[in-house]
Image (spheres, helix red, strand yellow):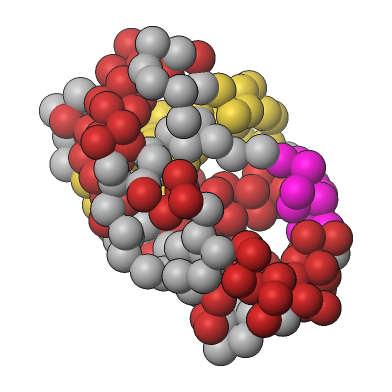
Amino acid sequence: MTRIVLIRHGQTVWNRKVRFRGQVDVELDEIGLRQAQATGQYVADRWPVTAVYSSRMQRAMQTAKAVAQAQELTTQSMEGLLDISFGEWQGLSPAEVSQRDPTLYQAWMKAPHTVHFPGGERLDIVRERALTGLEKVISRHPAETIALVSHSVVNRVLLCAVLGLGDDHFWQLRQDTCAVNVFETNEDDTFTILLMNDTCHLQSLVAT
């Protein structure tokens, strides 16, 4: 049995202003850095891990380093955890996208699994690379506990896969900044969810 502690990165300015981030390399803001520190300590107190993997985006790496440092580990980049490419939507607000491409935006809100972002990716592409990455780290760390730090989109599709759900359930799984999820492998290649979207460790911080 391998235990996975799946974490979303901390807050950025673009989280607060609500812009499509994707593969734009936005850093954590001041609150996000505090969230990352709190998350690192929370994970260390409850789930001693043997390895920490992260998306190469700075916001994820900064969060992962806080998790790793709390347990005297280093952070390893993993391509499977890279955020989706929103293509031409990256950097735009929902209002700007809705005005620019109303039909596709409505599809994103109601049927996200059908959307191919202009100049970007689809959810199934993200799901495939995330699952490939997950399988690799599970085979590399049998019977260990490892931490993965990624993004809202990646976490949602990965959790859908772990639950045996299609990407049409994407919006039914919430992922707040620095949310912690925990699941374990089973002998029949399925998973057991132990925790989802846990943010209790952030309650003492300024509300976001």
Q: Is residue 103 left or right of residue 176?
A: right
Residue 144 in sight: no
x%, y% of residue 121?
Answer: 60, 78
Residue sitting nearer the eye, 58 or 181: 58
Total numbered circles: 0
Span highlighted in magenta in the image: 162-173
- Name the quadrant containing residue 114: bottom right
> Does residue 181 lie above or below 122 as drawn?
above
Please identify the quadrant where the N terminus is shown.
top right
Which residue occupies the foreground of this view, 136 or 108?
108
Residue 197 point in image, percent of width and height:
59, 29
Position of residue 61 in the picture relative to residue 164 (left or right)? left
Q: Is residue 45 among what the camera can see?
A: yes
Going 17% across and 30% down the picture, which residue do you hit? 69
Which sits in the foreground, 98 or 166? Answer: 98
Q: Image quadrant of residue 41?
A: top left
Q: With respect to residue 42, does 25 lie above or below?
A: below
Residue at image coords 61%, 23%? 195
Measuring 53% from the left and 83% from the top, which residue is drawn there? Answer: 88
- Please say whether residue 150 is one of the residues in the magenta stretch: no
- Of 167 and 4, which appears nearest the observer? 167
Q: Is residue 102 above or below residue 80?
A: below
Q: Residue 56: horizontal and vertical position, in percent?
A: 30, 61
| Residue occupying the point 45% across, 70% down | 91
